[in-house]
Every structure is written in structure tokens, then in C-alpha cells.
Image (cartoon, helix red, strand yellow):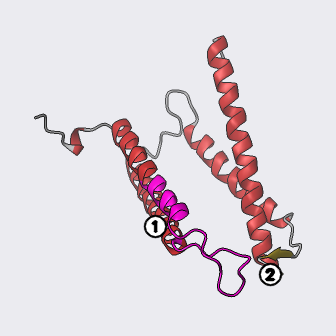
């Protein structure tokens, strides 16, 4: 039987198997959520549902969020230690300028989305939600996600079109 050592795996293989593992765990959590006790009526208002495993889904999402934050911070620290401080470009690509532009653009987008976000009162589960800060914050995330997803789709389509037509920059 062939032995596999994790330290012998390249980054692509680790990322692929990590993705497969996460997809399986996410699928199991959400299948359990919808199949086990999903249609329980809410005690105070029987018109609403109170799924049995809501706490498990919330805890799982918080665990994923915490893990993503830890990995992002670790990656930033590791990258900053490995990067040559004098090299602002790699193979003619202005990597530092691109990284700063992306980070600055994302922060600017989020600030503008929050400033111009709606704080209009909403009805949530039959109750009026009036907290202006959280309404604007939720609107900021929704708008930022839509803008960034649209930009990612456009960039992907452009890169695909450009690679198929072999046009030089």
C-alpha cells in the first residue's frame, strides 16, 4: 500500500482536497438542517418555523468565519515575511501596486456603500426593525457583494475572451 505524506503534497493538491472536504461537510450540515426537525412550528407564532438544527448551522458558519480569518491573518504574516521589501514588481507585473489598489478599492467601495446605504425601516418576522446602523451595514454588505461579484464575472469573461483570441496586451 502506498503511503501519502501531507508534507509531500503541493499547494494545489492541499487546496483541492480541502475544498472537497469542506464541500462534503457543508452538504452534510445543510442536509441535516433541512431533513431533521425543519418543519417545527415556532412556539410563540405557529405561522413561523423553528428548525431544530439552527444552532448547529449558526455555529458552523461562525467556525468557518473564524477559521477563514485565522488563515487570512496567517497568510498575510507569512507572505509579508517571505516578500522582498525592495521588489514591488514580479516579472514586470506591479504586484504591490495591484494589491494596494484592490485593498483600497474594496475599502472605498464599502465606505461609499455604507454612506449611501438605506436605513429605511424593515419588517422582520412581523416586527419593525429600525436600527439605522445595522440597516446601513447590511445594505453595505449586500451592495458590496453585488458590485464585487459583477466585477469578478466581467474580469473572468474578459480573461476568457482574451485567452481565446490570443490578443497581446
Q: Nearer the viewer, residue 93 or 58?
A: 58
Name the residue tied to disc 1. Answer: 63
Secondary structure under the numbered disc 2 in the rendered image: loop
Q: Residue 112 in the image: x percent, y percent?
A: 81, 60
Residue 167 visible in the displayed image: no
Question: What crowding class fits label 2: few (fewer than 14 Cα within 10 Å), some (14-19), or many (20 or more)?
Answer: few
Most distant residue in the top direction: 166
Residue 101 part of the magenta segment? no
Q: Residue 53 in the image: x percent, y percent?
A: 51, 71
Q: Residue 67 in the image: x percent, y percent?
A: 44, 62
Q: Which residues are magenta?
A: 25-53
Q: Mark 2 touching mark 1, by CB under 8 A?
A: no
Main SS, magenta region, reads loop
Residue at image x 35%, y 39%?
11
Q: Which mark is residue 131?
A: 2
Where the N terminus falls, by quadrant?
top left
Left or right, residue 67 beside residue 112? left
Q: Is residue 31 above or below residue 119?
A: above
Residue 26 part of the magenta segment? yes
Amino acid at each position: 500500500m502506498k503511503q501519502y505524506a501531507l508534507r509531500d503534497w503541493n499547494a494545489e493538491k492541499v487546496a483541492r482536497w480541502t475544498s472537497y472536504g469542506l464541500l462534503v461537510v457543508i452538504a452534510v450540515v445543510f442536509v441535516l438542517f433541512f431533513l431533521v426537525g425543519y418543519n417545527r412550528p415556532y412556539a410563540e407564532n405557529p405561522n413561523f418555523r423553528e428548525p431544530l438544527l439552527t444552532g448547529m448551522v449558526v455555529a458552523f458558519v461562525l467556525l468557518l468565519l473564524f477559521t477563514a480569518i485565522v488563515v487570512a491573518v496567517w497568510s498575510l504574516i507569512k507572505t509579508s515575511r517571505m516578500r522582498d521589501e525592495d521588489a514591488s514588481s514580479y516579472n514586470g507585473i506591479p504586484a504591490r501596486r495591484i494589491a494596494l489598489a484592490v485593498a483600497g478599492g474594496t475599502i472605498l467601495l464599502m465606505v461609499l456603500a455604507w454612506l449611501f446605504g438605506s436605513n429605511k425601516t424593515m419588517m422582520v418576522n412581523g416586527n419593525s426593525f429600525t436600527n439605522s446602523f445595522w440597516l446601513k451595514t447590511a445594505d453595505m454588505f449586500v451592495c458590496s457583494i453585488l458590485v464585487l461579484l459583477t466585477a469578478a464575472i466581467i474580469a473572468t469573461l474578459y480573461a476568457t475572451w482574451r485567452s481565446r483570441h490570443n490578443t497581446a496586451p
